[in-house]
């Protein structure tokens, strides 16, 4: 068994974003076993982990469907098999640790993080609005809940430039018709 602290929003977002679109092609960072093991080591703080890759990919796919609203939370049951919280009491109080089987610790952490975020801040986890070119997800921590893109420098800039170009292009025919 592995004990980890939760919630783990960074892990959740990292797992959701293992299917980026690069040069117009969707890539799966967990498809190749060596790439997946490197990603797992990265998320496990450099430790070698015995994570079940098939379960991790299935959990990722389910979480992506949950964000899109096309799955039920019951689909996360395999990632949560054998998972429980354990109370830890010390001189400062009580804290809770998630205990999960080593073969699906990352999948369990991500599932629990999704549930915590979904319960605490529904709608804050969403797909980037640049759906034509991007397949990444974001967690909106803004006060107004108005974040739309995975990155303002990347997708946000492209989308704003595209809208500006469209406005200018649509305004030009109207200006020409007024000249006549």
Image: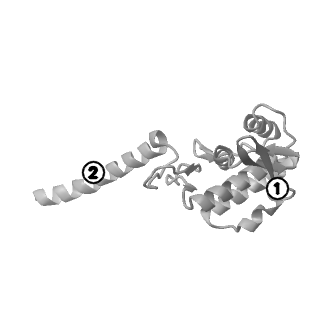
The C terminus sits in image quarter = bottom left
Q: Residue 5 appears in which quarter of the rendering?
A: top right
Q: Nearer the viewer, residue 91 or 20?
A: 91
Q: Is residue 30 left or right of residue 179?
A: right
Does residue 16 appear left or right of residue 52 in this picture? Answer: left
Q: Is residue 16 left or right of residue 163?
A: right
Identify the residue position indicated by label 2 in the image. Answer: 168
* x 72%, y 55%: residue: 112
Please tell me whether mark 1 sits on a helix, a strand or a loop: strand
Residue 56: where, in percent of width, then height? 79, 50
Residue 16 has which mark?
Answer: none
* Residue 76 place in picture, x, y as percent: 76, 61
Percent across and percent down for residue 131 are 53, 54
Residue 52 screen position, x and y as percent: 85, 48
- In three-dimensional space, the C-alpha distance between marks 1 and 2, rounded to whole angstroms, equals 57 Å
Q: Is residue 105 above or below residue 78?
A: above
Of 55 and 90, nearer the camera is: 90
Quarter of the image where one finds residue 71: bottom right
| Secondary structure state at the residue bearing disc 2 | helix
Q: Residue at x 65, y 67 (%)?
A: 70
Mark 2 is surrounded, within 10 Å at the Cα level, by few (under 14), some (14 to 19) or many (20 or more) other residues, namely few
- 100 lies above or below 41: below
Circle 1: is it few (<14), some (14-19), or many (20+) Cα within 10 Å?
A: some
Q: Earlier in the sequence, mark 1 or mark 2?
A: 1
- The answer to whether the residues at label 1 and label 2 have Cβ atoms under 8 Å apart is no
Residue 84: image tag: 1
Q: Give the quarter of the image for residue 42.
A: top right
User: Total marks drawn?
Assistant: 2
Residues 94 and 84: in front is 94
């Amino acid at each position: 068994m592995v004990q980890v602290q939760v919630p783990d929003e960074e892990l959740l977002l990292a797992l959701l974003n293992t299917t980026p679109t690069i040069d117009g092609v969707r890539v799966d960072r967990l498809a190749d076993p060596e790439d997946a093991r490197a990603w797992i080591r990265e998320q496990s703080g450099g430790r070698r982990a015995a994570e079940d890759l098939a379960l991790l990919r299935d959990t990722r796919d389910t979480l992506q469907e949950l964000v899109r609203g096309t799955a039920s939370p019951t689909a996360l049951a395999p990632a949560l098999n054998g998972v429980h919280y354990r109370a830890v009491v010390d001189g400062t109080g009580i804290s809770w640790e998630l205990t999960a089987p080593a073969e699906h610790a990352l999948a369990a952490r991500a599932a629990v993080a999704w549930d915590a975020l979904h319960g605490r801040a529904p709608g804050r986890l969403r797909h980037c609005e640049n759906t034509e070119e991007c397949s990444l997800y974001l967690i909106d921590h803004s006060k107004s809940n108005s974040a739309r893109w995975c990155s303002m420098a990347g997708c946000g800039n492209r989308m704003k430039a595209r809208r500006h170009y469209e406005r200018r292009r649509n305004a030009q025919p109207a200006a020409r018709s007024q000249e006549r």
